[in-house]
Image (spheres, grey):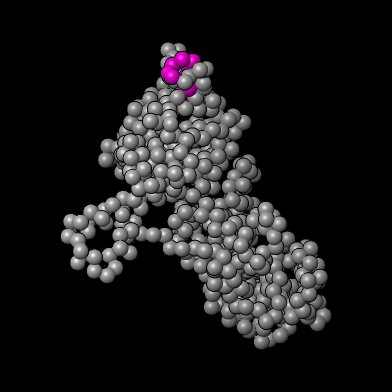
Amino acid sequence: MTEQDTGILVVDDEEEIRNILRLLLKKDGFRVFTASDGREAMQKLFSEKPDAVLLDVRMPGLDGMEVLKKIKQIDNDLPVILITAYAESRQAVTAMKEGAYDYLSKPFDNDEVLWIVRRALAERQLKKNIKSIDTRYSGNYSLIEQMGPSDKVARLVAEIHRVAKSDFSVVILGETGTGKELVARAIHDDSPRAKGPFLAVDCGAIPENLLESELFGHEKGSFTGAERQKLGKFELAHGGSLLMDEIGNMPAGSQAKCLRVLQDRKIYRVGGVKAVPVDLRLIVATNQDLQEMVLREEFRSDLYYRLSEFTIHIPALRERKDDIPYLAKRFLDSANAELEKTITGFTDEAVEKLMSYNWPGNVRQLRSVIRRAALVAVDVITEKDLNIKRAATPGMAFSPKIQGTPWKNASLSEIVQQSVLAVEKEVLTEVLKFTGGNKARAARLLRVDYKTIHTKAKKYGIEQIGRDDDETQAE
């Protein structure tokens, strides 16, 4: 639903207030209906069928609280935002108990009104999307609640339902932080395998020499340290679903063995000679373009065609900004509960920042930003509390050092070499932060060997970033 299709009913006995709100909302693209008292409001409710109501509390005749009760009896999901000059906390509590969505006091702030209206409409759309989904796949309710009420999320859920009932292998494409594991789990929960296990393995976080043991298991004594038999993820997921995350980082040798498993439906544990039958649904996720990797001969074409029976693309948060007001409120509510605080909302500047920011880390980054802001905020989250900074542009690490005239004391080749070293350090630092210090995964992402990563990290003094559980195993 577009804003042009969205109707707002404004109810207030003061003509000036009605006109201000009508012009404000129309300028923002909404259709606006007005009523001067409670009785007219009820008539407009039936004739215009608005998507939200701005309702004055103190009106002659049928007052706002009575109108609120009647509206809730007719449509409990219709968001009603009360506006009053009498901002008493007791009255606010009473209004919330009666089902009011939110509470504004006169004189109101225009941007705050628009923010609350958009947020209310987003939650109403969420409820509509949930009700429009067939009750047979109620497992996806959680997915909608976690990702947002936008039409793009609704279409995503429809795709999930379409493929879930089959036994197709699925490729999930999406940037980091978009919720690829959430989607994979929704596919499993909506499938005939829902009662079976759901397992996930990150192919980029496991050293190459241990990946096959993790996937296929190993027999006791098959290699140094194998003190007992271990079942792999393929075997443990028997009867259910297995998510292989960051499949693009899987080494070529493991790709070949994975293809064989898909074709034969059986695995051999490392060091074993007995075939073990497996029955599972394989779901893979990646933030890389596997087709491009196939063209560059970095990913097996036969494995790609075997995996990509159905492809789901998760839109980035910047592509579905309608979800930001809903998600920001949900994360704030969660943070308030966790921190035992009562942060009431966001300043106008904070709202503008949330809506205009590009969110390179997607929903995961938004949650982290809101959670941190709630920790430092006092009553309301400000732009300063958000502490959102524009991400550094790769390759610009050298720019601070070339201020002034560096060429006076260095040759061109020396300046270029210093720039290359600065960029190399910046890239390596960012990748190690991304992998949580896992050098084996960083090596695969940067397409260099593990020893190169280890040596350069030591050279630049950045080898202690995050955890590095793979170090002793990979050396």
Where on the picture, by quarter, is residue 120?
bottom right
Q: Is residue 56 above or below residue 474?
A: below
Q: Magenta span: helix, strand or loop, mainly?
A: loop
Q: 291 or 107: nearer the eye?
A: 107
Residue range highlighted in magenta: 215-224
Q: In the rendered view of the protein, which quadrant contains the C terminus?
A: top left
The residue at 81%/77% (across/down) is: 62
| Residue with the most extreme front position | 409
Q: Is residue 466 above or below residue 344?
A: above
Q: 22 or 186: nearer the eye?
A: 186
The residue at 60%/66% (across/down) is: 381
Q: Is residue 256 above or below residue 48?
A: above
In the shown orientation, is residue 174 left or right of residue 395? right
Is 464 in the magenta?
no
Q: Is residue 321 visible?
A: yes
Where on the picture, by quarter, is residue 440?
top left
Q: In the rendered view of the protein, which quadrant contains the N terminus?
A: bottom right
The residue at 80%/67% (across/down) is: 94
Image coords of residue 169 (percent x, y): 45, 34
Image coords of residue 269 (percent x, y): 45, 19
In the shown orientation, is residue 414 left or right of residue 403? left
| Residue with the most extreme bottom position | 16
Image coords of residue 354 (percent x, y): 52, 65
Image coords of residue 22 (percent x, y): 61, 80
In the shown orientation, is residue 269 left or right of residue 90? left
The residue at 71%/57% (across/down) is: 340
